[in-house]
Amino acid sequence: MWRTLSRTWGNRVFLALAASVAVYLYTGWLDWDPQPVPFAVMMAVVLTLVWMVYDILDDEPAHWVPSLPPVGDRVDQATSDLRILSSHVQASVPTEAVRERLVALARGRDPDLADALRRELGGPHDPARRLSPAEIDRILTRIEDARDHR
């Protein structure tokens, strides 16, 4: 690696000196009367910028590789669940949202329990009924128990 790096830098220094001398002689031939120190600084800046651009364009583009699997945000999920429960309690006509959320929670723990809850709470074509807080608590306890016994 060091040999390749030094060879690359050696080539660049040689090219920089050759280009600087050639441009300096050319500007002298055109009678532009270049000043040596400002000219050397200008060539260093210009060649540095040229090689920076060359290095950027020459390499393969960087790729982002996540090291950790994406994790759902529990705060957002809890907020969503709270909003669903509040809407269910306060709505004049209950919706299927609580029923669907409870079945989804059960499906994540035990698919058989999810099917049983789906039948118990009614299918998608059954009208939604308001679940009491006690019923919701009982269902959540069943889901937690299913998780513990699994």
Image (spheres, rainbow, N blue to C red):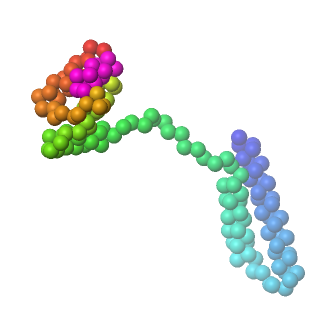
Q: Is residue 147 visible?
A: no
**Quadrant occupied by the C terminus:** top left
Main SS, magenta residues = helix
**In this picture, is 127 found above or below 33?**
above
Which one is in front, 60 or 22?
60
Residue 63: x and y in percent read 58, 44
- The residue under the point 86% across, 76% down is 26
**In this picture, is 106 found above or below 19?**
above
Q: Residue 122 sits in which quadrant? A: top left
Q: How many marks?
A: 0
**Quadrant occupied by the N terminus:** top right
Query: Residue farthest to the right?
Result: 29
First to last magenta residue range: 111-122
- The residue under the point 73% across, 75% down is 39
**In this picture, is 1 found above or below 117?**
below
Q: Is residue 39 visible?
A: yes
Residue 43: x and y in percent read 73, 70
Q: Residue 77 sits in which quadrant? A: top left
The answer to whether residue 44 is magenta is: no
- The residue under the point 26% across, 37% down is 97
